[in-house]
Image (tube, helix red, strand yellow):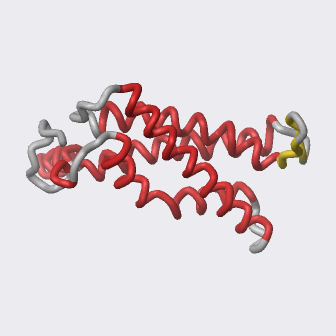
Amino acid sequence: MANKNTWRKKLLKNQVARFVLSAGMGFLVDISVFYLLYHNLLNQKRYHFFNSELRNSTVSLVISYGLGVAVNFLITKYLVFAESKTSSVQQFVRFASVAVIGFFANLSIIDILIHYFHMYPPRARPLAMLSLFFASFFIHKFFSFSLSLRHHAPGANNSQSS
């Protein structure tokens, strides 16, 4: 039992592990909402917004992605990069900016998976998200929360900021 608790404490001290937890929670919210919208709430194949026609999968992605980003930001801010001295507003603006770029990257990957590989949209969604996961840790660490690599190193003093 002592080894199990020691392992948990080490895991919770690891910033990458906490980021995986944060991203995982955002991922669960995103995927769950996407699935519910795609299958249960958005019954039409296409929707008209202003002068555009959007597929069910695109509308589902916009809503689910936004909710996933909100959950991910809050957990990342308070659990992963809490030592950041950057203002919360600046953190959110940066985080949201990265998320917007990530949204279009996700949308492009999903479009390729659905139209060129004929993949089922609820299967294409997690693949697109996972393909961009690793880059997001470093982008958010350095850009969104203005932290340096030394905050990631084992044994680093997490109270420092750059």
Q: Position of residue 149 (x, y in %)?
A: 21, 54
Q: Residue at x 37, y 38 (%)?
A: 76
Between 53 and 55, the one lying in front of the other is 53
- Taking the image as shown, residue 117 lies to the left or right of residue 20, namely right
Res 123 quadrant in image: bottom right
Between 17 and 111, the one lying in front of the other is 111
Q: Residue at x 77, y 73 (%)?
A: 116
- Taking the image as shown, residue 73 lies to the left or right of residue 4, namely right
Q: Position of residue 120 (x, y in %)?
A: 76, 62
The image shows residue 45, relative to residue 119, as above or below, that is above
Q: Residue furthest bottom?
A: 117
Res 90 quadrant in image: top left
Q: Residue at x 75, y 39 (%)?
A: 37
The image shows residue 30, relative to residue 152, as above or below, that is above
Q: Position of residue 102 (x, y in %)?
A: 55, 51
Between 128 and 33, the one lying in front of the other is 128
**How many callouts does the rendering have?**
0
Q: Position of residue 3 (x, y in %)?
A: 13, 52
Q: Residue at x 50, y 38 (%)?
A: 96
